[in-house]
Amino acid sequence: MELITIAIDGFSSTGKSTIAKQLAKALGYVYVDSGAMYRAITLYAMQNQLIDIDCFDSNQLIEQLNSVEIGFSFNESLGFSEVYLNGHNVETQIRTLEVSRFVSQVSTIPEVRKKLVEQQQLMGQKKGVVMDGRDIGTVVFPDSKLKIFMTASAETRAIRRYDELIAKGDNVVFDEVLENVKSRDHIDSTREDSPLRKADDAIEIDNSNLTHKQQFDMVLDLAHQILKKEA
């Protein structure tokens, strides 16, 4: 069967990663979480005192990019690949609200995006990949056969993110989570380099009122339609 590349873009906390993981598993494809790569670089910047609430030394981060190695290792017990930063498993650390506060700022740096886009394109050379992020259908894989753009209201996404963080035991305030969602939307959509936008040929899915199963069934059906055409 012909392999294709599937790009899933959209706003933060729209469930892109969850759907992409499920879709990759159902199709027997490789799943790549591009957002996790940006989160890993953000964690590196935080660990090396390059970014905090008051300042961001982007020049130092750019100089140190060659010292940042990001990898994925499949965890059989979890059923998905975990993120490694310079040889250390950081899957849990990169999912915190602290990292979320700074990841959009780090993502605006052209040198950071160039480094990661090159890595992402290498990962997709053989196709058979489902990748989610902000610029997969517009920049990383503009020729992908199936492009999905996921959206939902800021309030709906904030509730999802808040519930997720609480379930992990994080001490967070809903208003802070909502503000973070809105702030990331603004930064992601207005940055000069590869801003978040819906590709002209992407299929938009507003999942504000959809269940996970409804979303997944919809996306899987779209994938099967494309694969049938390519066969």
Image (cartoon, rainbow, N blue to C red):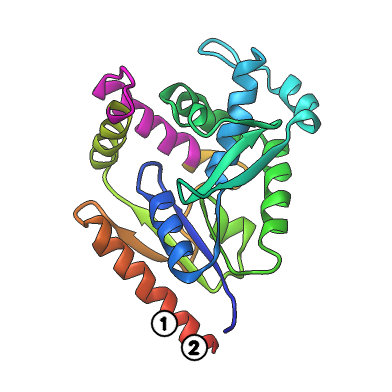
Q: Nearer the viewer, residue 125 or 24?
A: 24
Amino acid type at image mark 1? Gln
Image disc number at residue 102: none
Magenta stretch in the rendered image: 167-188
Please tell me whether residue 214 is drawn above or below residue 118 in the rendered image: below
CB under 8 Å between discs 2 and 1: yes
- Residue beneath disc 2: 229
Which quarter of the image is occupied by the N terminus? Answer: bottom right
Please tell me whether residue 99 is drawn above or below residue 195 in the rendered image: above
Residue 138, image x, y percentages: 57, 59
Name the residue: 66% across, 53% down. Answer: 120
User: Secondary structure of the magenta portion, mostly?
Assistant: helix
Which quadrant of the structure image shows residue 173? top left
Amino acid type at image mark 2? Lys
- Residue beneath disc 1: 225
Q: Nearer the viewer, residue 180 or 69?
A: 69
Residue 54, image x, y percentages: 54, 10
| Mark 2 surroundings: few (<14), some (14-19) or many (≥20) residues within 10 A | few
